[in-house]
């Protein structure tokens, strides 16, 4: 098990390295090169030359990559020139990333906590009312664009009904920052109102972001439970007179979870796409928001650091999924 | 032919009150767009305490459905069960789900055909044994563990301490079936139902598992219903044998008289293939020419007639009744050998 984890961590480093090469190549291939990208098309030749020198762009490509890598390892990804001009890209990432992680975890919790029990019940009462309602619900969840759903939620529950805040992460202005996860910070510092306020800001974006993962995880759970229900070992469990609770948990769900874990991992990896849209609609200051802003403002240092970080998280999530899988399925462990 | 109690029978069960008494058990499956299908049709048999009774017949004759009906494990919907299944005079078919749960695994244990698919792949073997003890004996997980260990030892699993923590995929086929037997017998039920317990195993392992089952039920004084398509399996094991065809009982008798002097042509056909244990597996699986697809309806004929070498005209026109004489029951108009008295028809009886 330990060797398995170490091997996967080495893979993580490798993936990040490969990604840095790609990112570097991407920056090189920008129209007009990095300098135009940073200074705009109308910069004077003198300032262009100065920046070219400063960035070492007059050096051979491998040397440039090496210095890029050296700076990156030291946490120097350049300075934002669009999203928050003047702020180092890494600082911007560290400030914004917790927001997106908080939002993503909330969305995943909503999706998983709804999808697992509903998937189980729908399978057990296959063809029943609940089954049909949930299937239609999951179809809607996939079919309605996240952007549109986010907008509807904001319009009804925030603007019309006023139940939830319209935008942002927190209204309490003087909340103490500890981890950057506002809900957690409030709990740690016992500033309950700050925590509750942050939670309220999360509700609507989390629901919007949860729609697709919910639909996918629900469907996989339902199909997987249906498969397991037909298994001989479920009949064996019944023949032993076990209670429904034990049969459900230990015999049905523990087996049905295997494909579900894979689905959850996959959906987690895809969350960033939805987060860009959701964060934009709710003006939620996370990396999704920064990413879309970075694209329109051509803020390459910011784009670069966010993409690297997102890729790292993606690989990390996959690692966690693989470990979870091995924990649940002994056949993977001993292979 | 005079019948003497075979010396290998565990005890003379005659006279003892039946432990399990199945009467007119009928299981009908509803099928979409088709007529309902009667999988078990008016089946009656008794199992006395400590007795081993065989249910024999080829695939599809209703053996598994019978066992699942007894256990209350048929699907919730899509079937109707009539008749009665009395355990100690209590009709299981009228019990609530909760009452049946209390009974399963505690009074009646069951083992199945395919040991790999019958075990939960993601739960350690030991846990799959202790959970029965926790459920029925009120033991804690911890106190159940030594009992489970002892049980694994009892069914001949070497190094039980290690096996407790292992998973099904780490065991061989024979060991898996032993583990299932340990689970089914952990609470010392008074009855065990074994549905083709050796069919999925190698021939040499088959013999070991059968020997183990015989030894265990004898030692624990457990009644056993042995379900098989292979008369060779019941040969060394059963006190009494019920031969099923198309969901109905066609012949019943004590093992020795039935083996030495089969009256029903179907029993005769099954028996003719038994001695060739090394014979072609396909031949042994389907020893009687033709298939159940040829069956006539029991309602107006003998279902076996199209495959029967003894068939006479009457067989296609009337339904033979099950007639008891002594310990023998026979459903046939034209029995083998001619000594047995042929059945009257069900139509005549009404
Ligand atoms: N759940 C079910 N629904 C419909 N038909 C069934 C069901 N279970 C069994 N049958 C039918 O009942 C008949 C008897 O099956 P079974 O008892 O499994 O035979 P076997 O003697 O081989 O164990 C078969 O024709 C089978 O197709
Ligand atoms: S009743 Fe007729 S067809 Fe049926 S088994 Fe006897 S002889 Fe054969
Ligand atoms: Mg069967």
Image: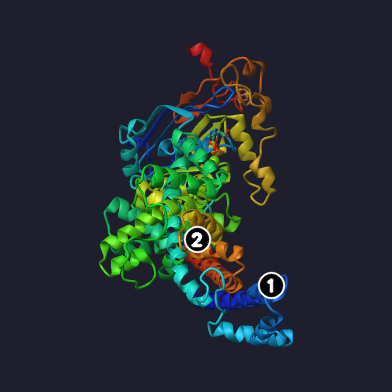
Residue B226 or residue A311, whichever sits in front: A311
Task: Name the spot of residue B162 as percent of width and height, x first.
Answer: 43, 70
Q: Which residue is mark 1?
A: A42
Residue B270 or residue A115, whichever sits in front: A115
Residue located 54% across and 71% down the image: A309
What kind of element bears circle 2?
helix
Q: Which residue is mark 2?
A: B168
CA gap, disc 2 and disc 1:
71 Å
Task: Name the spot of residue A103 as percent of width and height, x first.
Answer: 44, 60
Tell me the crowding category of disc 1: few under 14, some 14 to 19, or many 20 or more residues within 10 angstroms, Cα based: few
Q: Is residue A316 above or below residue A135?
A: below
Task: Name the spot of residue A15 as percent of width and height, x first.
Answer: 62, 74
Residue A297 or residue B307, whichever sits in front: A297
Residue located 49% across and 49% down the image: A150
Residue B222 or residue A84, whichever sits in front: A84
Left or right: where does residue A240 sit relative to residue B59?
left
Residue located 53% across and 75% down the image: A89
Left or right: where does residue A190 sit relative to residue B85?
left
Q: Quadrant of residue B140?
A: bottom left
Task: Name the spot of residue A67 as percent of width and height, x first.
Answer: 64, 87
Chain designation of label 1: A
Of tags 2 and 1, which is closer to the observer? 1
What kind of element bears circle 1?
loop
Q: Quadrant of residue B56?
A: top right
Can residue A264 be seen in this snapshot?
yes
């Amino acid at each position: 098990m330990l060797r398995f984890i170490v091997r996967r961590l080495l893979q993580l480093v490798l993936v990040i390295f490969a990604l840095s090469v790609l990112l570097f190549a991407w920056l090189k291939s920008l129209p007009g090169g990095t300098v135009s990208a940073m200074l705009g098309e109308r910069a004077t030749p003198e300032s262009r030359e100065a920046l070219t020198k400063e960035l070492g762009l007059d050096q051979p490509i491998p040397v440039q990559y090496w210095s890029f890598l050296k700076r990156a390892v030291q946490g120097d990804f350049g300075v934002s020139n669009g999203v928050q001009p003047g702020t180092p890209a890494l600082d911007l990432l560290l400030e914004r990333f917790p927001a997106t992680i908080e939002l993503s975890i909330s969305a995943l919790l909503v999706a998983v906590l709804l999808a697992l029990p509903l998937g189980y019940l729908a399978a057990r009462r296959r063809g029943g009312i609940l089954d049909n309602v949930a299937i239609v619900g999951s179809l809607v969840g996939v079919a309605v664009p996240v952007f549109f759903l986010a907008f509807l939620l904001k319009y009804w529950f925030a603007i019309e009904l006023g139940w939830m805040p319209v935008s942002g992460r927190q209204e309490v202005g003087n909340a103490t920052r500890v981890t950057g996860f506002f809900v957690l910070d409030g709990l740690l510092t016992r500033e309950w109102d700050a925590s509750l306020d942050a939670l309220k800001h999360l509700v609507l974006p989390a629901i919007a972001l949860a729609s697709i993962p919910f639909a996918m995880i629900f469907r996989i759970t339902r199909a997987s439970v249906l498969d397991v229900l037909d298994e001989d070992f479920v009949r064996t469990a019944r023949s032993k007179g076990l209670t429904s609770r034990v049969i459900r948990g230990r015999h049905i769900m523990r087996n049905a979870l295997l494909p579900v874990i894979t689905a959850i991992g996959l959906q987690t990896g895809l969350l960033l796409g939805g987060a860009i849209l959701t964060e934009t609609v709710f003006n939620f200051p996370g990396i999704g928001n920064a990413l879309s802003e970075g694209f329109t403002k051509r803020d390459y240092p910011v784009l670069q650091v966010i993409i690297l970080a997102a890729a790292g998280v993606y690989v990390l999530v996959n690692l966690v999924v693989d470990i979870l899988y091995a924990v649940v399925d002994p056949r993977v462990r001993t292979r | 032919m005079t019948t003497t109690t075979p010396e290998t029978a565990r005890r003379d069960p005659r006279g003892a009150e039946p432990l399990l008494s199945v009467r007119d058990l009928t299981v009908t499956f509803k099928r979409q767009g088709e007529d309902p299908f009667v999988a078990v049709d008016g089946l009656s048999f008794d199992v006395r305490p400590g007795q081993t009774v065989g249910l024999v017949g080829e695939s599809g004759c209703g053996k598994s459905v019978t066992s699942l009906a007894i256990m209350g494990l048929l699907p919730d919907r899509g079937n109707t069960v009539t008749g009665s299944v009395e355990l100690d005079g209590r009709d299981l078919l009228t019990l609530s789900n909760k009452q049946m749960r209390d009974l399963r695994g505690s009074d009646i244990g069951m083992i199945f055909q395919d040991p790999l698919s019958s075990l939960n792949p993601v739960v350690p073997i030991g846990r799959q044994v202790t959970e029965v003890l926790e459920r029925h004996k009120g033991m804690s997980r911890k106190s159940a563990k030594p009992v489970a260990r002892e049980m694994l030892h009892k069914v001949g699993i070497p190094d039980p301490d290690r096996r407790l923590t292992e998973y099904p995929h780490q065991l061989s086929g024979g060991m898996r079936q032993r583990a299932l037997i340990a689970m089914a017998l952990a609470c010392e039920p008074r009855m065990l139902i074994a549905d083709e317990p050796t069919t999925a195993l190698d021939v040499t392992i088959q013999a070991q598992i059968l020997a183990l089952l015989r030894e265990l039920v004898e030692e624990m004084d457990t009644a056993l219903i042995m379900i098989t398509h292979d008369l060779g399996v019941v040969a060394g094991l059963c006190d009494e044998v019920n031969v099923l065809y198309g969901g109905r009982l066609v012949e019943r008798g004590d093992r020795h008289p039935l083996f030495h002097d089969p009256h029903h042509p179907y029993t005769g056909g099954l028996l003719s293939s038994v001695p060739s244990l090394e014979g072609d597996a396909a031949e042994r699986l389907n020893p009687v020419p033709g298939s159940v697809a040829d069956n006539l309806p029991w309602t107006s004929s003998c279902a076996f007639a199209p495959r029967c070498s003894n068939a006479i005209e009457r067989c296609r026109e009337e339904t033979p009744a099950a007639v008891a004489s002594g310990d023998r029951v026979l459903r046939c108009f034209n029995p083998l050998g001619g000594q047995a008295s042929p059945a009257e028809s069900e139509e005549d009886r009404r």
